[in-house]
Amino acid sequence: MPGSSETKNGKFERQDGALGQPVVGARTKVGNRARTSLTVDFGETENCLVVIFLRGGADTLNMLVPAFDDDYHRFRPNIGIAKSLPLPSSGPGALAYGLHPQLSALLPLYESGELSFVQAVGTDNLSGSHFEAQDQMEHGSTFKGGHVEPLSGGYLGRLLALSSGPLGPLSAVSIGTNVAESLRGAPSIAALSGIDEVVLEAPEAETAAVSATLAKLYGGCSNKDLAGAASSTLQMLERIKVLGLKQKQESLAKVNGSGIAQYPDSELGRGLRDLSSLLKAKVGLKVACIDSDGWDTHFVQGNEEGLQAGFIKDLGSSLRAFQDDLGPLRKKVTTIVLTEFGRRVYQNSSLGTDHGRGFAAIISGGANKGGRVIGAYPGLKEDPSLTLAPTGLSVLIDYRDFLFDVMKNTFALDEELASVIFPGNKYRQIL
């Protein structure tokens, strides 16, 4: 509904005027559907973008391991990955990268061409601040004059605000209790902490009666926008209720050994399970965001085992279960994994790593083109005495170019939309 309507442990937001101005242009296509050059007709497409954000600045040098680089092992005598899983070569002269052993679940996806890595992605942010780097990345803005330039709304919100037609209440979903900043400005956003927890605030025996009363009340409302939003919200609640019951049945079947995808019992695993249920139910989901916390590994990071290895295993197992669960639908669902910045190359005195710059992103599913490592390797030359700046892996790929390419390939966008979704960025094709 206009403003916001809340459910238990879930929020439904509807926002108007996301870009402040109407958008018009000449018509073109999304797949077989029409759109304009400055508006997008998402139509009935099942294509979807899922963004997994590793909060805290993930050390991707220990995930996509430059096993070929002696400097890596020299800078990390205690926390480096000595026994990584070799990645198949992606062509003549390709560098011999390895995977962290706890990412073994992703190796078959890479080998089958369903998953790739994008090396040396990042922002131009030199602050070393988690808050500033995350804020910049989620809004799609620029770091200039020592600060992040303000930009209204998030980059995914601007994408959805270009829709030439109405979007459903579950077109944008943020898994968790808060709305992801990248979705701000979208016509509607649903923040869900869990499918089985989204219910009307009423006694269980009375929910059907309350829903019927609300439907009757708003059905006779003279304000068509209000009536339509109310109807969409009630439909959303009913569909989520059905999905929750189905999940309980599948959980029981898993216990009985039916072969259903087995997700880790973690926030990320449960969240991706919920997203898979929404996608398979065809509720009109276009973009979704989910976080994985705890990646700020300043102290006792570990190597093949230890603190970071636990997070890495959860990521790999959750993403693999999500892809398996989607089945054929994963050809239409693009999943990316990113973080606000990488870590410095050398281990610190606490056997951890400090804030760095570039990182390796992951892309899987629909918009991915073959199993490969995309982007050049910048090397690991670094002066450990430079303690006042977030150095580390150099940034060779602007995060906005990577994100727009992902959106372009997922939704068949025209390149001129790059400057609308990411104002101020001079787009360069990466994928």
Image (tube, grey):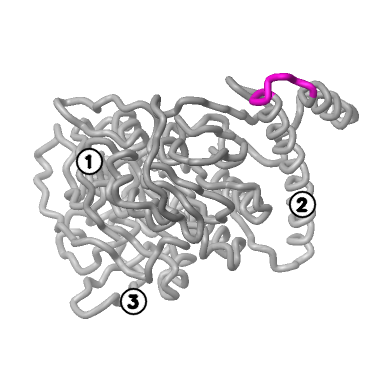
The amino acid type found where label 2 is placed reads Lys
**Does 16 appear in magenta?**
no
Using a 10 Å C-alpha cutoff, classify the residue at mark 1 as few (fewer than 14 neighbours), some (14 to 19) or many (20 or more).
Answer: some
SS at badge 2: helix
Residue 200, given in percent of the width and then of the height, sits at 76, 28
Q: Amino acid at mark 3?
A: Pro
Residue extending farthest front: 26
Circle 2 Cα neighbour tier, 10 Å, few/some/many (<14 / 14–19 / ≥20): some
Residue occupying the point 20% across, 69% down: 68
Mark 2 or mark 1: name the one nearer the start of the chain: 2
Q: How far is the residue under mark 2 from the one under mark 3? A: 39 Å
Q: Mark 2 or 3 closer to N-term?
A: 3
Q: Mark on residue 246? A: 2
Tell me: 172 left or right of 1.
left
**Magenta stretch?**
220-226
List the residue tagged with mark 3. 88
Residue receiving disc 1: 425
